[in-house]
Amino acid sequence: MSGTIDQAFVKQYQAEVHEAYQRQGSKLRPTVRSKTNIAGASTVFQRVGRGTAASKARTGVVPVMNLEHSNVECFLQDHYAGDWIDRFDELKTAIEERNVIASAGAYALGRKTDELIIAALDTATIEAVGTGAGQTDNDGLTRAKILLAFEMLGAADVPDDGNRFAVVGWKQWSELLAIPEFSNSQFVGDNELPWKGTQAKRWLGATWMPHSGLTKAGALRYCYFYHRTAIGHAAASEVITDITWHGDRAAHFVNSMMSQGAVLVDNAGVVRMRTKE
């Protein structure tokens, strides 16, 4: 095998892995605050408190808001997804075999990205559960529970600026479909029906989407209603691919890897909805 052919194989494979990760690798990364090109083992996300406006006398000194500044540290973790491609497999099914393994590696790292973000969401402490609102842990994803989470975000002055998201399990997505305000065109309009196009839709000022990887504790599935800036995601290295030839195996070893992390930045911006499943 000539060096030129090998390099062409490597470059094409790297491009396919990157494209697959960007296309379908992570569902949650676009919904959170993200930083890239991090140098070092960790990075810091700044958190600023709320300011208070005040009046002043004519020619008087402008009042200072005295904003409270704090930060949270996000530690990066290294993750790998490798596999072998036999030399004769390349000759027999070159394109298909390469695409399959490239996609598998990218999807595995994409799921790991989502695992990091979900782990950060799981550290939130505010929950939409209260007997006064008519829902308990023994309920599924009810209209009352959703509206309580919606109220809690509003009461915490979480911005309703188009950057709110809600992620639920597939069982809870089915329960949402039974709520007329969510799935009936008379309430949401024909363009916002949840089964048109991708499985995501706008409702209550947020983008709702189902996810198969949310934490399940016993019979309870943890679903979340949150603002983009409440969760921080950092990447020291995007998905990259290293391919080496092993003559003793007559195969390439393909290793896709990344260095990323996630952290809860603002607890007030995340509301957990515990649902029975």
Image: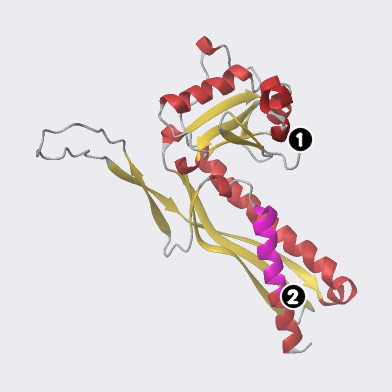
Q: 107 left or right of 259?
A: right
Indicate the amino acid at tag 1: Trp
Q: Looking at the picture, does residue 219 appear above or below residue 14?
A: above
Closer to the camera, 81 or 224? Answer: 224
Q: Residue at x 14, y 33 (%)?
A: 56
Q: Is residue 21 magenta?
A: yes
Residue 221: where, in percent of width, then height? 63, 30
Label 1: few (<14), some or many (≥20) within 10 Å?
few
Q: Residue at x 72, y 88 (%)?
A: 3
The image quarter containing residue 138 is: top right
Q: Is residue 3 magenta?
A: no
Q: 149 left or right of 185?
A: left
Q: Earlier in the sequence, mark 1 or mark 2?
A: 1
Closer to the camera, 104 or 166? Answer: 166
The image quarter containing residue 207 is: top right
Q: Quadrant of the N terminus?
A: bottom right
Residue 260: where, in percent of width, then height? 52, 56
Indicate the secondary structure of the residue bearing disc 2.
strand
Q: Which residues are magenta?
A: 12-25
Q: Residue at x 49, y 22 (%)?
A: 151
Residue under pointer 2: 252
Q: CA distance from mark 1 to mark 2?
A: 42 Å
Residue under pointer 1: 195
Which one is in front in this view, the residue at disc 1 or the one at disc 2?
1
Q: Residue at x 41, y 63 (%)?
A: 40
Residue 45: where, in percent of width, then height? 39, 50
Q: How many marks?
A: 2
Label 2: few (<14), some or many (≥20) within 10 Å?
many
Closer to the camera, 14 or 206? Answer: 206
